[in-house]
Image (cartoon, grey):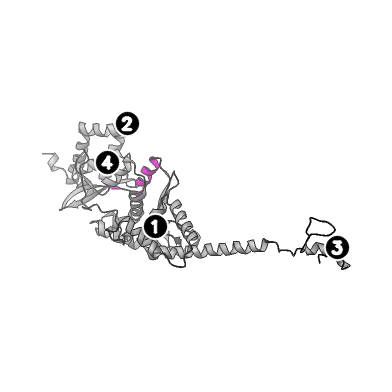
Amino acid sequence: MEHNNLPATQQENDAISALLSKEAIKKRFEQVLGKKAAGFMSSVISAVNSNGELKKANPMTVVAAAAVAASLDLPINPSLGFAHIVPYKKDGIPIAQFQMGWRGFVQLGMRSGQYKTINTCAVYEGELIESNRFTGEMFFDENKRTSDKIVGYVAYFKLINGFEKYLYMTVEQIHAHGKQYSKSYSNAKGKWQTDFESMALKTPLKLLLSRWGILSLEMQSAVQYDQAAIKTMDGAYEYVDNPENNGDVIDAESTTTAPEETDADLLAKFDASIPKDTDPEILKLFIVKNAAHNKTTDESVKLDAAKNLPGFWKVYAAFQKIELKKKKATDQKTDEKKPETEEMAKAECPENPGTTYTKKHCDECKTKKEGMCKVW
């Protein structure tokens, strides 16, 4: 009876503590974290105590979300930004949701040993100098910044084997992404509204890794459990904020190619689109360079090009223009180095049979000067 007379928040805190005190749950955390288990469970209680809404959530969803963070060996301290346990209401019932932070994705990527570099950051107005959507290359210059206005966010990684990839999203694209794939986007207390920057840093990074990165088992789990309500300690989960879990779709990057087109159709489409003024050697060089940069094949470059021919030929036209200038400059240098063809005598020298001299040589000969040379 005394327990029932306690304030509601105190009862909720006691419920979390009681659940964490259960032998089976303590054992689960100890199996995963070893000696760090006690400290981690204390951090769970601290996280709940610091969030009034989280105190009201179903205790099991809180502890189960914490178990996911523990399995990934990521701290749940909100100020660190590696992983979060956030409150969410499903049909009016408070539950806890597990969310990855952008630093958590970086941590798991570096831990895998596959990444040489991995990062995500804001891009200010004027900093994005050039973007090649076929090679994936992007060039930024902080010195070109024209204002303190953030216009987008870019994620980047480079693997140990040399493969690298960028993903740039404008602020507008990120907002559109949040509206489409997160029911809590408009919630005044949700992270999209209270901490937009962390969500903006995370969004392109998560998409970049899930599409092109090498995903370790830990990384796969992070992508799978992100934004999910974990219902049991065995990892049963439900996407309450995003039921379809379509977080890896961006309208701006949707393909324009009809799904029924085969590779043979696309290659034929590419060949038929080659402009008449295209230099075959330069086109081959362009395709080979693109394939080498993206660690793919010449055929794959053509297949991708066929999905957006206007864009491909626009980029190629600029490349061909540069290459033709280089070729012209090289030809001019070659012509300048060619020696002039000297006029030769019409026959062998009478005074030195078996040898034919140049006119320049003969002009110095006394016999020719005196008009006595039979050859001239």
On the rendered image, what quadrant is the N terminus found in? top left
Give the spatial CA distance, label 2 vs label 4: 17 Å
Residue 280 in picture, x, y percent from top left: 47, 61
Residue assigned mark 2: 35
Give the spatial CA distance, label 1 vs label 4: 42 Å
Give the spatial CA distance, label 1 vs label 2: 55 Å
Residue assigned mark 3: 365
Labels 3 & 4 near each other (Cβ < 8 A)? no
Above/below status of 328 relative to 30: below
- Residue 199 makes an appearance in the image: yes
Residue type highlighted by circle 2: Lys
Residue type highlighted by circle 4: Val
Q: Which residue is drawn at 28% across and 44% down?
A: 47
Residue assigned mark 4: 68
Give the spatial CA distance, label 1 vs label 3: 67 Å
- Residue 80 makes an appearance in the image: no
Q: Is mark 1 on a helix, strand or loop?
A: helix
Give the spatial CA distance, label 3 vs label 2: 103 Å
Q: Which residue is drawn at 46% across and 54% down?
A: 288
Q: Give the range drawn in magenta.
A: 98-114
Q: Label 4 neighbourhood size at 10 Å, few (<14), some (14-19), many (20+)?
A: many
Q: Earlier in the sequence, mark 2 or mark 4?
A: 2
Residue 270 in picture, x, y percent from top left: 38, 61
Between residue 76 and residue 338, name the one nearer to us: 338
Residue type highlighted by circle 1: Lys
